[in-house]
Amino acid sequence: MTQPETRVSPGLADMNLGDMNKEEFRRFGHELIDWISDYLERVEDLPVLSQIEPGDLKAQLPSTPPQKGEAMDDIIKDVDRLIVPALTHWSHPSFFAYFATSTSAPGIFGELLSAAFDNKAMLWRTSPASTELEEVTLDWLRQMMGLDTGMTGIIYDTASVSSMHAIAAAREGVEMRIREEGMSGRKDLPLLRVYVSEQAHSSIEKGVITLGLGQRGLRKIPTDAEFRMDARRLAAAIAEDKENGIVPFCVVATVGTTSTSSIDPVPEIVPICEKHAIWLHVDAAYAGSAAVVPELRSILAGCERADSLVVNPHKWLFTPFDLSVLYCRHLDLLRRAFSLVPEYLRTPEQERVRSGSDYGVQLGRRFRALKLWMIIRYFGHEGLAARIREHCRLAKLFASWVEESPSWELLAPLPLALVCFRACPPTAEVDETARNRWLDVLNEAIMHGVNATGKALLSHTKLNDKLTLRLSIGNIRTTEKHVRQVWELLNEQLKLLSKQT
Amino acid sequence: MTQPETRVSPGLADMNLGDMNKEEFRRFGHELIDWISDYLERVEDLPVLSQIEPGDLKAQLPSTPPQKGEAMDDIIKDVDRLIVPALTHWSHPSFFAYFATSTSAPGIFGELLSAAFDNKAMLWRTSPASTELEEVTLDWLRQMMGLDTGMTGIIYDTASVSSMHAIAAAREGVEMRIREEGMSGRKDLPLLRVYVSEQAHSSIEKGVITLGLGQRGLRKIPTDAEFRMDARRLAAAIAEDKENGIVPFCVVATVGTTSTSSIDPVPEIVPICEKHAIWLHVDAAYAGSAAVVPELRSILAGCERADSLVVNPHKWLFTPFDLSVLYCRHLDLLRRAFSLVPEYLRTPEQERVRSGSDYGVQLGRRFRALKLWMIIRYFGHEGLAARIREHCRLAKLFASWVEESPSWELLAPLPLALVCFRACPPTAEVDETARNRWLDVLNEAIMHGVNATGKALLSHTKLNDKLTLRLSIGNIRTTEKHVRQVWELLNEQLKLLSKQT
């Protein structure tokens, strides 16, 4: 990224109004591939969390657009100079925050090809490759996860959107003419309700709000000591609501909650849903990928009787963001909820093929299946399973250090590769509430201390009103070395802060 | 793409569980850059419309996933052998169907970098670069389009989603506690209604359905002889609905309809919306980009008083799909409609920064601003305007040939770069309806004939119940040569079919 170049605005000096010429494309393309290859190596030496202050990048960019075209060299230089410092490096092997996720080489190549093909896969004919590769690849993933053949997959951008579509299909299934007549201005329509645990992801509530069902249309069920939905309380809530004239129509169980990766008891929830003919959607956005590991497949127990399930290959299958998959047993309902084919989209083959836009809000759809197909082929089922298995091993190793140390404690069970823990050194406080407040302050300081080093990134949650540190392992480049390092960083911060107090 | 290679499943033989090694990444990356560079050159010789039959690709792919990893060489070979024939080539310069759109080199490079950074820009801190570059780049685009400073941009994936968000913000603006209480089970809620022209895009109806407002919640206003919303009939419909206790809360005007690119009379619609305090959303998904051409800026007349406006750089600003921009005057309402911040997403700086996930259904957001920033810088405002100006010139040139020929006719005015036309050779039919039916059959046959040659792709619509051919010019590689060629193809087909009848 060094050769300087001067270039007049393309298409003005020479009246060539096309794209970049072939030689330039190759030259800059190669340069960027090498740059990315270096980036993925040196990212480990960059601060995980961007160290800029709000507004720093904006202040360095011109406030008006360039009139004339600029040289590609200058643009690439600015990626180095301005963009990289403003990135939080999700590709860093010590990114342990939120759900650690990662891109991978075959995924990057898939996105590169997709950007060149630039297909809009709204109809079969506008991208037969995208339509058919999606069907095949999602069936491969279904098999790898051990889901039954009744589940048909469809790709959306994010789990938020996948889950919203599942709830919309369930809403269509209540047979109250909501598509035709809507919900406003109707005195005949009872209150419709969706059920989740208190630990469910906020996207479910957001989907319910978007669909016009409102926060009142969502009931949160308490969880047990291990943060799993209490199925008896779900049954009681549904019975109570029905007595009050409310219509329960959808339960969203979570396999792998965001705070703790807890797994709702789907086998206990299934009969409740079946008894009341309620749609059961499973949010396995994070944890579903783990089911490709044969010995972890049991996390999806009961899902053979669920109506739909979301899993995000962009979370733990090394797929660049975005690619979320909704598996659904009732594509007909999804289609009824969303299909609208205007004249300008009618095609001769439409009765014989599947067209993605029939199943969702979005008309245009990116060719996302390509990257997932390349990833599954490059790593193979065994290669993917081996990586996820290793992440679980590393998380359990870290948890064992926590457990062995008197200064730290686990705050939740560890079914997969997310560790919930906190520092708990001895304190003068005897009152438990006061001690917890003190530990909250301490742990928050430890987290910010570690994050400020730039050497690792953690995030937090609250469990039983205790500030809880979260260590999530899911990056393809994370090794035992990185996990040991963050453990040392945590202990250094604890020591430093203990001295100060 | 020729060097053969054998490779054992990565991470199993050598217990290296990481990603592809650096040397392989560079080798295959360079190979793919060269392959894409060749593809973008030879795409002109490939059939625009994929010639495969439904199921052809599926039949060639294994029905089960590979257990072991495969060699990247083999995967790339299959892209050539299986994927390319199954693509409809949106990058082909003779793609004239739907809205012709195109990717471009700086856009492809932007997607390549985004896939490597793999940022999830839900919060400022998870991607300061994405958050701040989005603000700056969308302000550049706002200036280029001549929109006023009251309009703040936010990126979504598609116009369908952008418009749905605008309507959701308008719904929040009715102050009927729809976010909190929803719309079901409420006897106090009047019928809420959105207004569009009969020529509006189907995505508006789909958005209204998704939001729970139902098809009854959408009223379609007739258009004038030039396919523009009849503002007097809009005013009458609103008055009538209000008399009947219905609450009109949103009008969606279209600047550049999908069938004909007609432009609704926004300056006449504005006072109607202002009188009744109705949210005015402008769907300029296609045509909005043309406003970067100074002499075409007038297409957005009146939009300085609209509440929101969607424009899709992935349509006519050479941006790889997907990138849709919603400009909105009331971000506070959009935020009120969608913001939900659980504990695990709270950050110290959250009061001082903008976080994208506060404004939409989606939590995770791709780093889409990067490609648009690279495109605006590489081509410059003048370079982008010059290309769009040229597309309009080519469309007018084609339209002049249609007008000059006795065998063809225009079926709609031509404000930009979309031509609506049909063959109309003399026939024995005297009855107009019978003649139109005959011409429908003829024109459909002409379209399929041209498309079957693989040398160009057209699509159709219906105008005044007449089958209408659509020629859309928007690909960065389209030149006068391609437009002349499709004109010849059309005339060949007409001659061929006239002989047969």
Image (tube, coloured by chain):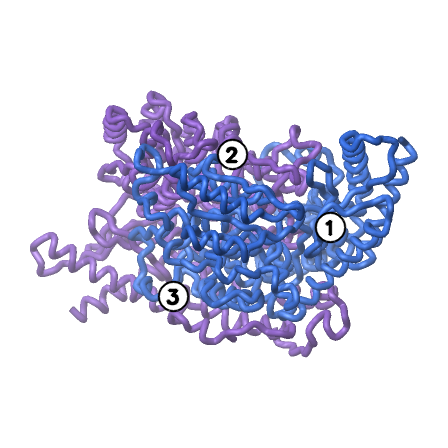
Chain colours: A blue, B purple
- Residue A244: where, in percent of width, then height? 40, 37
Give the residue at the far right of this rendering.
A499
Q: Are marks 1 and 2 on the same chain?
A: no
Asked if residue A317 is positioned above or below residue B381 in the image, the reply reads below
In space, the residues marked 1 and 3 are separated at their CA atoms by 58 Å
Classify mark 3: helix, strand or loop. Answer: loop
Camera-side mark, 1 or 3: 1
In space, the residues marked 3 and 2 are separated at their CA atoms by 37 Å
Which dot marks residue B455?
Answer: 3
Which dot marks residue B142?
Answer: 2
User: Could you say which is closer to the camera, residue A13 or residue A263?
Assistant: A263
Classify mark 2: helix, strand or loop. Answer: helix
* Quadrant housing residue A41: bottom right
Camera-side mark, 3 or 2: 2
Residue type, mark 1 in image? Val
Q: Which residue is mark 1?
A: A419
Q: Residue at x 65, y 77 (%)?
A: B3
Q: Are marks 1 and 3 in contact (CB under 8 Å)?
A: no
Classify mark 1: helix, strand or loop. Answer: strand
Q: Are marks 1 and 3 on the same chain?
A: no
